[in-house]
């Protein structure tokens, strides 16, 4: 099974369309959205191509392929227009015998991690900085932001397949970093 992870679309229709193109090109089975889907929030400038209604339409068409967690900019009003659940604070996956904790990152993150065992994986967005870090007891992965990257990063996403995670550039799918579960 191939999985794709993206975060922080912030209502940017261009980035959402490109993310879905990458999803199709990757031939991924499921797309995990790690929050901040429609609203840009008070700390971010309005993203280019800000069109939340277009994002709603694009994502609702793919609702059967989406799993989402709630970001700090996601609200009950957003849930009223999206045809798939977005209000869970976290989700759990089990890959290669490890627990994968998916969240947005504003509550559970590297400063306040959930209860993880050695070798487990924490995946969250929120910082808009793509990262793979295995220097802790657990592995930390951040797919970056699909719309408003920070720290000099490009727009990005992550993919998991056959025991490996890859951070990839949204524009062309080129690999930036990789991690093999081992």
Image: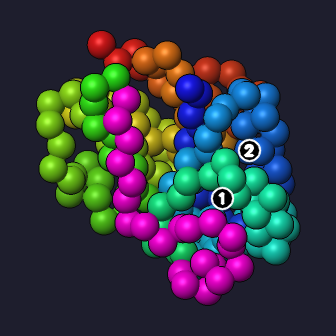
Q: Position of residue 85 (x, y in %)?
A: 56, 68
Residue at 54 percent of width and 75 percent of height: 74
Q: Of the numbered discs in the image, which one, if any, rests on residue 78?
A: none
User: Counting other residues with Cα less than 10 Å from the Cα at mark 2, is it few (<14), some (14-19), or many (20 or more)?
Assistant: many
Residue 26 seen by the camera: yes
Read off the residue under disc 1.
9
Read off the residue under disc 2.
19
Q: Residue furthest front?
A: 64
Quadrant location, the C terminus:
top left
Q: Within the image, what quadrant is residue 80 found in?
A: bottom right
Question: Mark 1 or mark 2, which has the lower sequence index?
Answer: 1
Secondary structure beneath label 1:
loop
Q: Within the image, what quadrant is residue 154 found in?
A: top right
Magenta stretch holds residue 28: no
Secondary structure beneath label 2:
helix
Q: Could you give the CA–CA distance between mark 1 and mark 2, rounded to whole angstroms?
A: 9 Å
Q: Position of residue 21 (x, y in %)?
A: 81, 39
Tell me which segment is drawn in magenta.
75-95
């Amino acid at each position: 099974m191939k999985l794709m992870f993206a975060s922080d679309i912030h209502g940017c229709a261009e980035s959402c369309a490109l993310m879905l193109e990458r999803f199709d090109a990757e031939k991924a089975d499921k797309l995990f959205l790690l929050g901040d889907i429609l609203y840009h929030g008070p700390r971010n400038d309005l993203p280019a191509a800000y069109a939340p209604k277009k994002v709603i339409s694009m994502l609702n068409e793919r609702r059967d392929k989406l799993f989402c967690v709630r970001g700090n900019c996601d609200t009950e009003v957003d849930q009223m227009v999206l045809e798939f659940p977005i209000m869970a604070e976290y989700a759990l996956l089990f890959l290669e015998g490890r627990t994968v904790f998916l969240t947005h990152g504003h509550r559970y993150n590297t400063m306040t991690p959930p209860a993880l065992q050695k070798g487990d994986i924490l995946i969250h967005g929120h910082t808009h900085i793509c990262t793979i870090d295995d220097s802790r007891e657990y592995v930390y992965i951040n797919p970056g932001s699909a719309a408003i990257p920070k720290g000099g990063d490009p727009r990005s996403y992550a993919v998991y397949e056959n025991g490996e995670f890859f951070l990839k550039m949204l524009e062309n799918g080129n690999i930036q970093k990789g991690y093999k579960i081992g």
